[in-house]
């Protein structure tokens, strides 16, 4: 007997298709790859771990080639991958390539969080997954013998130097985590030293800079993706989670770190929002140090999708330099 075709309920092309039985077929994103005890190109070691069983949150942990760093404590980087909240993975080829390069360059212990994805999981719970992961990582700073401890973190992690970062939707999550960290404490009194936002996914109903307005605006990818994945968002595309200058958005002065790096790409549709974020942080009264890096002639996520190019290598070196300061 032939298979019966499933009925489509809705589509977010070219990213995914939702069927009436509730299943989701992702049409975009790179192939997942296993971790490596020693990456042949960088010497970086990685393994996959479980952070939480309920809800299920996992991660890929990375350490640099340790023979070069005997008995040395390393900065800790908590990373959130991109993919518009609905595709890609901490375990994908392109994200693994990025992390191997960054960990090798910066000499950090990195944890790339595998948060759950929309539309199966409501967007607010994605932020909650990443906050839960950050709290679990911070808990390794305390001298106790919990059952769910990761040896690479306890052995090599310096919890006086904790950073967070992400690209695209992961950069949006990073921003929202920083806002929460400005109000809530982390286990062990851990403080976030710095954060980087690469090609951050922010948007709003009113165009800025070179963004187009009018009816065509609602057809742009940043608008369509948010409204499809979170149709009940209070304020819609002007929800403070996606629009940091919305009337209801809290002051950026409460960002919970002391250093911030914002990176944009000249040809990216999200470019002007990233620049606006940089300027808004500077003007907010926030007491930290913020930097802006723009790469000319490049489009969104070039350093991940075209990871072998010279510009990709340069931006990874720039991120590493930020982590090394």
Image (spheres, rainbow, N blue to C red):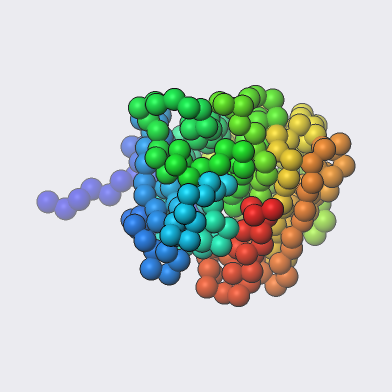
Q: Which residue is located at x 79 percent, y 46 percent?
A: 289
- Say which of 299 and 91 sits in front: 91
**Which residue is more in the foreground, 110 or 246?**
110
**Where 298 sits versus 141, above or below?**
below
Q: How many marks?
A: 0
Q: Establish if 310 lies above or below 13.
A: below
Quick one: which residue is furthest to the front in this view? Answer: 71
Choose between 283 and 104: the one closer to the eye: 104
- Farthest bottom residue in view: 310
The percent coordinates of residue 13 (x first, y second) are 50, 54
Residue shown at the point (71%, 67%) measured from the top left: 295
Specify whether residue 30 is in view.
Answer: no
- Give the residue displayed 45% in from the left and 66% down from the top: 42
User: Residue 157, position in %: x, y?
Assistant: 51, 42
Q: Nearer the viewer, residue 325 or 301?
A: 325
Q: Quadrant of residue 258?
A: top right
From the viewer's perspective, tell me whether residue 132 is left or right of residue 221: left
The residue at the point 64 percent across, 69 percent down is: 314
Residue 297 against residue 193 in the figure, above or below: below
Is 255 situated left or right of 112 in this image? right
Residue 186 in view here: yes
x and y, in percent, of residue 14 in the image: 49, 57
Where on the picture, by quarter, is residue 193? top right
Judge left or right: residue 275 versus residue 38. Answer: right
Question: Residue 313 at what x, y percent from top left?
Answer: 59, 69
């Amino acid at each position: 007997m032939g298979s019966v075709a499933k009925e489509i309920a809705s589509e977010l092309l070219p990213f995914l298709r939702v069927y009436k039985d509730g299943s989701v077929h992702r049409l975009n994103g790179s192939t997942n790859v296993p971790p490596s005890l020693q990456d042949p190109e960088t010497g970086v070691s990685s393994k996959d771990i479980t952070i939480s069983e309920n809800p299920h949150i996992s991660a890929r942990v990375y350490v640099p080639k340790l023979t070069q760093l005997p008995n040395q404590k390393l900065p800790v980087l908590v990373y959130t991958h991109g993919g518009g909240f609905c595709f890609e993975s901490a375990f994908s080829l392109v994200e693994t390539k990025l992390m191997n390069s960054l960990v090798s360059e910066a000499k950090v212990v990195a944890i790339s969080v595998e948060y759950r994805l929309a539309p199966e999981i409501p967007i607010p719970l994605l932020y909650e997954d990443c906050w839960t992961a950050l709290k679990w990582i911070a808990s390794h700073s305390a001298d106790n013998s919990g059952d769910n401890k990761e040896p690479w973190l306890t052995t090599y992690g310096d919890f006086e130097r904790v950073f967070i970062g992400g690209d695209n939707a992961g950069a949006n999550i990073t921003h929202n985590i920083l806002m929460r960290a400005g109000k809530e404490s982390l286990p062990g009194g851990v403080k976030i030293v710095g954060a980087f936002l690469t090609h951050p996914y922010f948007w709003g109903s009113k165009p800025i800079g070179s963004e187009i307005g009018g009816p065509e605006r609602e057809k742009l990818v940043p608008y369509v993706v948010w409204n499809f994945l979170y149709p009940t968002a209070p304020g819609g595309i002007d929800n403070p989670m996606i629009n940091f200058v919305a009337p209801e958005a809290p002051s950026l002065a409460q960002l919970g770190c002391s250093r911030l790096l914002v990176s944009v790409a000249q040809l990216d549709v999200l470019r002007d929002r990233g620049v606006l974020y940089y300027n808004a942080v500077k003007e907010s009264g926030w007491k930290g140090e913020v930097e802006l890096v723009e790469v000319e002639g490049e489009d969104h996520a070039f350093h991940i999708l075209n990871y072998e190019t010279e510009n990709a290598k340069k931006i990874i070196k720039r991120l590493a330099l930020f982590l090394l300061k």
